[in-house]
Amino acid sequence: MSDRIVLHVDFDYFYAQCEEIRNPNLRTKPVSVCIFSDRGGDSGAIATANYIARKYGVKSGMPIKFAKSRLKQISDAVFLPADFPYYSDISEKAMEIMKNHADVFEYVGRDEAYLDVTKRTQNNFKNAGHLAQQIKNQIRNEIKMTCSVGVSSNKIVSKIASNHKKPDGLTMIEPQNTESFLAPLKVSDIPGIGKVTEEKLREINLNTIEELRKVDIFTLNKMFGRKISLYIYNAARGIDEEPVAEKQPTIQYSRIVTLKKDSTELDFLASSLEEICADVYETAVKNKKMFKSVGIQFIQSDLTGKTKSKMLKNPTLSLEELKKTAHQLLEEALIDQTLGVRRLGVKISELSDLQGQSSLTNFF
């Protein structure tokens, strides 16, 4: 698995850049793309901001009112509602360009993808660098968008590399340079290491990846458990054997609403949960799909997320089963809930077609 060349392509400030394509006059202004909530006014959060807005401290996930306060002295600051159908159209065009340059293409999200280019580059990093630049040029010429590309022998190092020289960067890390490239980086540069994990590592004076490498796997096991520890241990050394693989998009039906107030009260949340379940159920019926997995989602008062899900024994299309399972998950999630719930959602997945006698039995 070490004889590979993998590209990670990551679009710079994707949603805001899409808006700049639609209106080039925005390129010189601080632009923030917002997800407004149902509460009206400036209630909601920033989806993404361009680099001009970021200079003033605006960042993804920040409440819109906080972002506006940071830009209140900037008369030409722009706040736009998110237009996801438009962003998806732009993304599809860019992904088609990437697919045409890949041996194997793995879609990750609207703004990122992995490409295995080992065969077409003859496993030559110089050729891979040229190919990465070709992809960047074609996307810039045809879509008017910039992206950053990381090139290495595996997915994790390429992902770290793509973030190294943003925006509009190209970073190539050959295998013999992997450890020296990673050494001075922060532990938080490893994908998947969030604030909680970073703080635990900082408590024992581990701030850089080089320092992290000095810790043995047994110490990490005690701190994080076996699975996470193995990932951290390997990532710090640039080890990742996961192949680039074409993946079918995960199909699920979901609905999330903004509540009238932040709350941790079961009765209040349960009343909204009933309506959300009914909406999701209606979508499943319309598409003639049974579901086997039920999940709930919280967006908390600090805008962090929390999810909980359950796999059912058999696929079903029963509204009562959906409500019962969602309510059970809600009760379990609230046991240790301290932050108020701002938004509440329900999703169903593991979908299958509604057909045949057994399906009708489950339905009724």
Image (cartoon, rainbow, N blue to C red):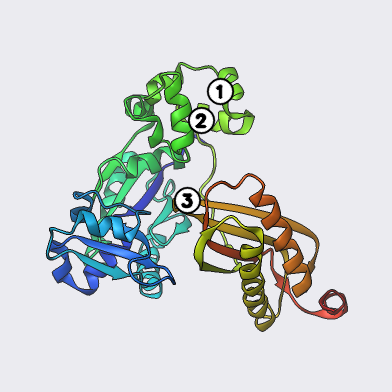
Instruction: Decide which of tag 3 and tag 2 comes sooner along the chain.
Output: 2
Q: Position of residue 67 (x, y in %)?
A: 27, 56
The residues bearing labels 1 and 3 have C-alpha atoms spaced at a distance of 26 Å
The residues bearing labels 3 and 2 have C-alpha atoms spaced at a distance of 23 Å
Q: Which mark is residue 232?
A: 2
Residue type highlighted by circle 3: Thr
Mark 2 in CB contact with mark 1 (< 8 angstroms): yes
Mark 3 in CB contact with mark 2 (< 8 angstroms): no
Q: Position of residue 5 (x, y in %)?
A: 41, 42
The nearer-to-camera label among 2 and 1 is 1
In the rendered image, which residue does mark 3 sit on? 304
Q: Position of residue 349 (x, y in %)?
A: 66, 64
Residue furthest bottom as drawn: 286
The nearer-to-camera label among 3 and 2 is 3
Res. 249 visible in picture? no
In the rendered image, which residue does mark 1 sit on? 220
Question: In the picture, residue 6 is in which quadrant?
Answer: top left
